[in-house]
Amino acid sequence: MAEPRQELVPVTVLTGYLGAGKTTLLNRILTENHGRKYAVVINEFGELGVDNDLVVDTDEEVFEMNNGCICCTVRGDLIRIVNGLMKRRDKFDGIIIETTGLANPAPVAQTFFVDEGVKARTRLDAIVTVVDAKHLPARLADSHEAEDQIAFADVIVLNKTDLVTPEELDDVEQRIRSINRHAIIHRTQRAALPIDQVLERGAFDLSRILAMEPDFLDGDDDHEHNEDITSMGFEVAKPIDPEKFNAWIGALLQEQGPDLLRTKGILNYTNEPRRFAFQAVHMIADGDFITEWKDGDPRSSRIVFIGRNLNRPKLRRGFEGCVAD
């Protein structure tokens, strides 16, 4: 008697340009009371890993892949992680892959069709793209990745709607529709929407993708990257003075904001048991205390800049100058 065929594991690819709100949405998924468990794969573009610290502490397993576009150098890692997860298939209900903000989602999606081992045990449920309503027009002008992320989306989370006027929001949605007329669009603030609108959608349509990209199933990784965008990360062991840091980062964002696509850091403030998470997109900054430092953890402060025209010595001196006396 043949063994019953095991149900394919649903995979959600969570994409969107730098700072659009992917991690915010991921945290909502992981903290929502939906009674399901997800294995999470996070891909960072950066010299230092920070995103993993920005994900809330949960029972879920989080795998981090650093230094590389998920669509190129780490596809082998992605296949290895997914195959490894299948050995613990009973521990989770689905897989969520959060791509770096500079990733073209097409080669990520290809993985679930061109690798026979992965294809036999998983199904691509949906590509969910988070879009920054305020900065999308600029991104479409200077980044082909932002357009690719929209074109391949099954679900679009049009985020940060509170930062634009109703007229600007309508214009942004029209721009999205001109690129992708099939995707469902949800307007959100802080990526707040019912989780069942992004998970278990069964929305990925291979025929639509093949109509758009006939060679999709060839598994070719030949795509361009924005070579002028670089990442620089810095770490200091001594505690940070919050007043010094706020003064420095405020001046830096005002001066170089247009070139700073994404700034994110985990900071160890003086006399503070909790970690401080700092994030910025261009000149718009946000931050809050998150979990306490765990016993035995090295209490260092890390910050990552992703952008253009970055001056490493100047950024290093500025960050090190925030150390408490």
Image: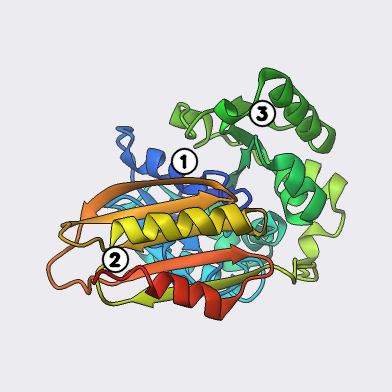
Residue 126 vertical position relative to residue 268 in the rendered view, above or below: above
| Depth check, front residue: 78 or 178 | 178
Name the element at disc 1.
helix
Discs 2/1, front: 2
Residue that badge 3 annotates: 184
**Residue at (79% x, 54% y) in the render:** 142
Horizontal arrangement in the rendering, residue 93 relative to residue 68 (left or right): left
**Residue at (58% x, 71% y) in the render:** 231
The amino acid pointed to by label 1 is Leu
| Depth check, front residue: 85 or 176 | 176
Pick whichever of labels 2 and 3 is earlier in the sequence: 3
Name the element at disc 2.
loop
Residue farthest to the left, as pictured: 295
Quadrant housing residue 300: bottom left
Residue that badge 1 annotates: 25
Pick whichever of labels 1 and 3 is earlier in the sequence: 1
| Depth check, front residue: 265 or 125 | 265
- Where residue 158 appears, as percent x and y from the top left, is 62, 32
Asked if the residues shown at circle 2 and circle 1 are in contact, with their CB atoms under 8 angstroms apart, the answer is no
Quadrant housing residue 276: bottom left
The amino acid pointed to by label 3 is Ile
Name the element at disc 3.
strand
- Quarter of the image with the C terminus is bottom left
Pick whichever of labels 2 and 1 is earlier in the sequence: 1
Residue 54 vertical position relative to residue 80 in the rendered view, above or below: above
**Residue at (66% x, 28% y) in the render:** 184
Residue that badge 2 annotates: 240
The amino acid pointed to by label 2 is Ile
Q: How is the image coloured?
A: rainbow
- Where residue 321 appears, as percent x and y from the top left, is 38, 72
